[in-house]
Amino acid sequence: MPRTSEKRTVDMQVIGDWVEPGARVLDLGCGQGALLHYLVQSKQVSAVGVDLDFAKVTACVRRGLCAHQGDMTRFMRDFPEKHFDRVICSRTVQELADPAAVILEALRVGRAVTVGFVNHGFWKNRLNALLQGSKIRNEVYTTEWFESRPSNPVTVLDFERFCGAKGIRIARRAHLAGDWRTPCAALPNLLAGYALYDLAR
Amino acid sequence: MTDDQENVTPAPETARHLAPGDVGLVTPRDFVHREPFTFRSGQTLPGFTLRYETYGGLNAARDNVIVICHALSGDHHCAGWHTPQDRKPGWWNNLIGAGKAVDTRRFFVVCANVLGGCQGSSGPSSLNAETGRPHGTTFPFVTIRDMVRAQKLLLDHLGVTGVHAVVGGSMGGMQALQFAIEYPRLVRRVLAMATTGRESAQAIAFNEVGRQAIMQDPAWNRGDYQRDGGPRVGLAIARMMAHITYVSDASMDRKFGRRKKDTAAPEAYTFDLQFEVESYLRHQGQSFINRFDANSYLYITRALDQFDLEEGGLTLEQAFAPVEAETLVVGFTSDWLFPPAQNRRLALALLRAGKRASYAELATDLGHDSFLLESEDLYALVRAFLEREGTEPVNYEI
């Protein structure tokens, strides 16, 4: 199994641990629905995904998931407060044009919000910038800059500052080491490869 | 729905009906309901006929059924060929067949001409047994719900115990949604494309222009005319105008641009045929009057206009409350008659009502009729929805 898909599985397990069985879950940027499919199988959630891409929505439908093709913020505006038990934004937040608006809207329509992202402050990422002087390319960042979507190099420190500034309560956090498996106990901004946050208002 | 030749895959002249995957030669049948039927309007008929076609085989449980609902000018002939000499196959032949997106090896497909139609089902052009003359405008007013209730009686007649999916575009999508509301325990999936829960003022306005073209034609005679007569000019104009609403600026421009007919008069200062698009629309109008009844056009456009899931102050969520089916709504980016936003709105309301619903939006530039498009992307989506997990294995009855 390639290392990236192994990492994806770890990510899904942490999110799965936080999801209440039978919850109504919205996944922002659901892709082909791998995470939602896992949550339906393991936690019997009632799942909805949002994605911009027709082929990805087709893949979700093929998996038996409900999916909605369109803009995630526009989608959420059509729902009343706390309609979803949990809104998930996994590996999407760094690519959003207006991440604050999306997270705040997710906190309106969801009782809880899970955000997961690759920590750009991880020491290898810092070292890469320092030594290579080029865009990072590894098993996480697989593409050249000119074939990549625009991406914010968000870090653990940045994200916690954002939550503080917006008065967002961090109910749980999970920092994983560079292998995305071992819990990272100390200095997460430097030593965590991946970060997950469970947010509430 | 247009009579557009472009939607037809060219096949060799000989034995086109034997093309792989096609359902082949098909024969329409008539379901005659011999009990009184009360319309939503309160008007009644002593009975009615629905002309329908079926493809594929019913399984032992009699529940592998896919109901196809047609649009305003469509009919029961949605796949296959009536004779080897037919100019073209059924209107959704690209979607329905063995191994196609609606797979007739797996599903039993039923499609009926709607009540109020003119292709063999009871409608204003069918004969009133009491007078021996066509009903004309004495035919009861028809609603989308009446159409659906009549089709349910057909399904009962066929001994259907469960419907795997109801599938339709445009007015067919309205019927599909109404099916799920009216018979929640029967319908397991709904696939509604290029549709709406209520027409906009603009869509009603276009229908009204069509109706006026018919009713202002002296030959309409308040709906009292013989079968091969009637307001042919008015109906042709209605069709020409409506046709424009089924396509798009981009697709018309690509197809015709400002090209002139070869036969056009050399000087421009004439009202004779000049542009290819004029010739095309005239052809659309002429071919339509040979197959469609003007009174049916009035009745069915009225049914379209009156369809309103939010009627009586209901919210869409309230309207969808009874639904138990999983729903997939598909909008098309260039559809300006029933635009993507109106399709999206249906899926969102279903989700808010706690139902299982998906929305997909296909990028096309062909306008409202995009649902008839030959598109591998659309086929993949339709197949994914109809065959997705949760589909019970089918035991075929030979």
Image: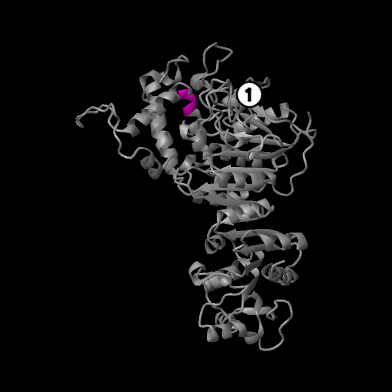
Toward the bottom, the furthest residue is: A187
Question: Left or right of A11: which side holds B317?
Answer: left
Residue at horizontal 65 percent and vertical 42 percent from the top: B181
Question: SS class of the residue under badge 1?
Answer: loop
Residue at horizontal 47 percent and vertical 28 percent from the top: B298
| Quadrant position of residue A118 | bottom right
Query: Percent x, y for residue A197?
Result: 66, 76
- The residue that mark 1 highlights is B26
> Please, what is the dominant secondary structure of the magenta stretch?
helix
Query: Percent x, y for residue B250?
Result: 39, 45
Seen from the viewer's position, the closer of residues B380 and B313 is B380
Toward the front, the furthest residue is: A132
Seen from the viewer's position, the closer of residues B145 and B370 is B370
Question: Tag 1: residue type?
Answer: Val
Query: Percent x, y for residue B160?
Result: 74, 32
- Please say which color scheme the image uses: one colour
Counting other residues with Cα less than 10 Å from the Cα at mark 1, is it few (<14), some (14-19), or many (20 or more)?
some
Eyeballing the image, is B126 above or below B285? above
| Residue B249 part of the magenta segment | no
Q: How many marks?
A: 1
Toward the top, the furthest residue is: B132
Eyeballing the image, is B204 above or below B290? below
Seen from the viewer's position, the closer of residues B211 and A118 is A118
Q: In what quadrant of the picture does the N terminus of chain A appear? A: bottom right
Residue at horizontal 38 percent and vertical 18 percent from the top: B219
Tell me if I can see residue B350 in this picture.
Answer: no
- The residue range painted magenta reads B293-297
Question: Left or right of B306: which side holds B317?
Answer: right
Query: Percent x, y for residue B173?
Result: 57, 40
